Image: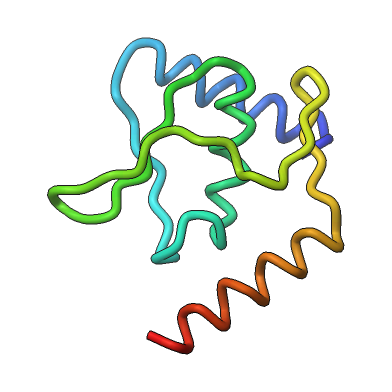
Amino acid sequence: MQTEEFESALEELMEMAASERIALMCAEAVPRRSHGSLIADALLVRGVKVKHIMSRKTFQGDALTPWAMVNGKQIIYPAETLEINFNHERKSHAAE
């Protein structure tokens, strides 16, 4: 997310979103476990509205990943926090 390539692709995505509604697809059922959440966070810190479509009738609003550390447009995800949250989510889904 700190590369010129990512920034360039994000700019292209924002240009497309400025003129039409777009959707990025991901197979993950839990948005926070998806690579798409990284893109969503990058868009959110740039003021772009993001919705996570959960089903035909429901969506989750635009909320930054709770453990994301933001400095301007730069986002950092502390490794120890990611591991704790990932393991917690995995245990929660195993109980279901």
Q: Quadrant of residue 79?
A: bottom right
Q: Quadrant of residue 22?
A: top left
> At which x and y percent is residue 42?
64, 31
> At which x and y percent is residue 81?
79, 59
The C terminus: image quadrant? bottom left
Image point 34% across, 38% down: which residue? 23
Query: In the depicted view, which residue is nearer to us: 29 or 24?
Result: 29
Coloration mode? rainbow
Query: In the depicted view, which residue is nearer to us: 42 or 17?
Result: 42
Image point 51% across, 26% down: which residue? 13
Query: In the depicted view, which residue is nearer to us: 96 or 72?
Result: 96
Q: Quadrant of residue 83?
A: bottom right
**Residue situated furthest left in the rendering:** 57
**Residue 52 falls left or right of residue 65:** left
**Residue 65 falls left or right of residue 83:** left
> Compared to 28, does 32 lie above or below?
above
> At which x and y percent is residue 19?
34, 11
> At which x and y percent is residue 44?
56, 26
**Residue situated furthest bottom in the rendering:** 95
- Count of numbered circles in the view: 0
Image point 71% across, 47% down: which residue? 67
The N terminus: image quadrant? top right
> Compared to 88, does 29 lie above or below?
above
> Compared to 25, does 81 lie above or below?
below
Image point 79% across, 36% down: which residue? 69
